[in-house]
Image (cartoon, helix red, strand yellow):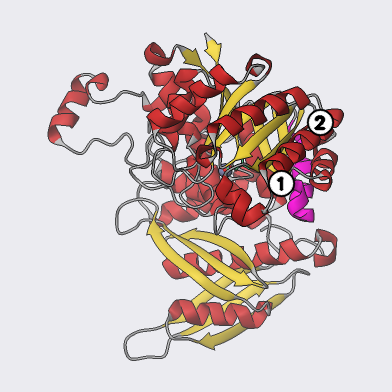
Amino acid sequence: MEKVIVFDTTLRDGEQAAGATLNIDEKLEIAKQLERLGVDVIEAGFPISSPAEFEAVRQIALQVRKPIICALAHANNQAVDRAWEAIKDARHPRIHVFLSTSDIHLLHQLRKDRETIMTMACENVARARKYCEDVEFSPMDATRSDPQYIFHLLEATIEAGATTVNIPDTVGYAIPEEFAALIKGVFENVKNIHKAVVSVHCHNDLGLSVSNTLSAVRIGARQVECTINGIGERAGNASLEEIVMGIHTRKDFFDLSTNIDTTQLYKTSRLVSELTGFTVQPNKAIVGLNAFRHASGIHQDGILKERTTYEIIDPKSVGLPGTTLVLGKLSGRHGLRARLEEMGYTLADEELSRVFEAFKELAEKKKEVTDRDLEALMAEDRRVISEVYHLEHVQVSCGDHSVPTATVRLTGPEGQILEDAALGTGPVDAVYKAINRLVGVPNKLTEFSVKSVTEGIDAVGEVTIRLESEGMVYMGRGAATDIIVASAKAYMNALNRLILSRAPASKIGEKKPRK
Ligand code: KIV
Ligand code: ZN
């Protein structure tokens, strides 16, 4: 069966989403998971945009060897050179050159004419091609550009060395039939199109990104650009899991396949949600909490008789953990390890000991520890490993007739114990003020949300926050059965990320030994 190339841009377009702030380690972790997922191309970033972005792309190029590692560049010499420097050690490097082509962009943003754009595009594709065999070109805002101009430009850039030509619906303006017609036009009017792969890149402003992508695939596009959970600029990009499961589930219609290991989809979605702080909506196709939940009696009856009556996808095929084992306070290390392995986590002994300790603590508070609780424990463990300051203890006193007061104890970068107290307008405010007195990094809290990981009064609460400092946004998450403790952990997580992003590890002092 013919293959569709899956080009993942979670780390580039996805990370451009407002409020997404991934550090280098997190980008690497996502890139490694994307490799396990089986994506063909990882767009790792936009190296010229900042030194940190450059370094993240470089590290991914060095450490993630199976997929093609792609770096984005404007159509200018410095950007192309910087992109190449970042990916030159990749096993399979690709440079992706882009330039706007719509009259709206040419007139108001670039203030250049079509001829100049044509020259810039060709020169920089040729420059990229001198460095690298694999070069992609994108005419930005293609769906609002003059199609005849796009056809000429694609022909010229393929002539200049582009091996993939990508048609972006940059502002999510296209309608599926219209987009399919544009792709058909590309095949019919670009004389040398057989020398390049035709790719599509759809944004979701009208909620049509996946439909547009699939309609282009139907016409012959053989690369799809997408992101995990559909994250990206504004309303986001086409969602990888939806496109892939569309192609897999409707093989009868598309007669195509991908290299994706679909059983890794759920895990990848959870990881990206966890690290970006973007919660997946419950009704999200494929990976949402309710995607395989049947509430109506008629549906439940049908499912019990035969799963396919109301399910077009087997939840196991996307890696949704089917609960076979319920864990509780009598469960041992082996039971925990087995369950985590079924969920796709392989733990070293030291890691298992830490998670087991946290599991026991939770099991004392909750009768049944569910898979979602275990995911929260795993996420919590990941957060604690990369700490500069560690929350040892938090205590609050509050009520409708008292002034909320918090006492906080932290371990500092050199292992020193730090303790302080503060008053606040509420218990969380008091805790955050006390932490600020100890850590001393000016910042502004811009977002605070709390949700329960599972149902029930004993549920684990998960707090997500964002704070701003010196123009940068930092996300933090924390989970605990006590939401004040979860709030304190989320704040510490954001502050630790902020501090780590500013100072090299060597300047922070010895990492605190783990408990
Ligand atoms: O949406 C867009 O046009 C892009 C390009 C850089 C491909 O992201
Ligand atoms: Zn885009």
For the residues bearing labels 1 and 2, Cβ distance under 8 angstroms: no
Seen from the viewer's position, the closer of residues 206 and 108 is 108
Residue 514 is situated, as x and y percent measured from the top left of the image, at 69, 57
Disc 2 marks a residue whose amino acid type is Ala
Work out whether 504 lies above or below 122: below
Disc 1 marks a residue whose amino acid type is Phe
Please provide the residue range marked out in magenta.
46-64
> Would you say residue 47 sits in the magenta stretch?
yes
Q: In the figure, residue 386 lies in which quadrant?
A: bottom right
Residue sitting farthest toward the left: 298
> Would you say residue 408 sits in the magenta stretch?
no
* Quarter in which the C terminus is drawn: bottom right
Residue 176 makes an appearance in the image: yes
Q: Which mark is residue 484?
A: none
Secondary-structure class at tag 1: loop
Horizontal side of 225 relative to 196 (left or right) equals left
Residue beneath the point at 39% across and 59% down: 451
Q: Which mark is residue 46?
A: 1
Question: Taking the image as four quarters, which one is ligand 2 found in?
Answer: top right
Residue on which disc 2 sits: 126
Q: Nearer the viewer, mark 1 or mark 2?
A: 2
Secondary-structure class at tag 2: helix
Residue 476 is situated, as x and y percent measured from the top left of the image, at 56, 61
